[in-house]
Image: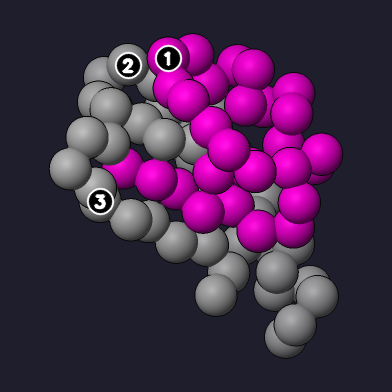
Amino acid sequence: MKTGFSPRKTCTSVYLMGGSDQYKTQLEKLRKHKHGNACPNINKLADIGMSVLEKLITFSYQHMSEKYD
C-alpha cells in the first residue's frame, strides 16, 4: 500500500507511509485535525488545507514508489 484512506464513523483517516518524522512540518500546516503515527484524522475536508493534504499524499506515494517499485 502506497497510501490509503479509511472512512470511519467520526472522521476519515489518511494513511501516510514512510514514518511520521517526515511529515511533522506539513502536518502542522494541515490545520484542524487529529493524528496518530502520520495518519491524520479529518472530520471535514473544509476544516483542513487541501493543498497541504495533497502534498502529504503525493510525498507518501512518491516515497513508497521509490522504495518498492
Is 68 left, or right, of 10 in this rendering? right
Which residue is label 1 attached to? 32
Residue 14 x %, y % = 45, 48
**Mark 2 residue element:** helix
Residue 62 x %, y % = 69, 62
Q: In which quarter of the image is the N terminus?
A: bottom right
User: In the image, which residues are magenta?
Assistant: 12-39
In the rendered image, is residue 53 in sight? yes
Residue name at image x 70 percent, y 69 percent = 64
Give the mark nearer the N terminus: 1 vs 3: 3
Residue 8 x %, y % = 24, 48
Residue name at image x 74 percent, y 42 percent = 20
Q: In which quarter of the image is the C terminus?
A: bottom right
Q: How far apart are marks 2 and 3 (CA)?
A: 16 Å
Which residue is label 2 attached to? 47
Which residue is label 3 attached to? 7
Label count reads 3
Q: In this view, does 41 lie above or below 69?
A: above
Q: What residue type is labelled 3?
A: Pro
Give the mark nearer the N terminus: 2 vs 1: 1
Occupied quadrant, residue 56: top right
Residue 19 x %, y % = 76, 51
Q: Distance between the residues labelled 2 and 1?
A: 6 Å
Residue name at image x 59 percent, y 52 percent = 16
Q: Is residue 14 within the magenta segment?
A: yes
Q: Which amino acid does label 1 sit on?
A: Lys
**Mark 1 residue element:** loop
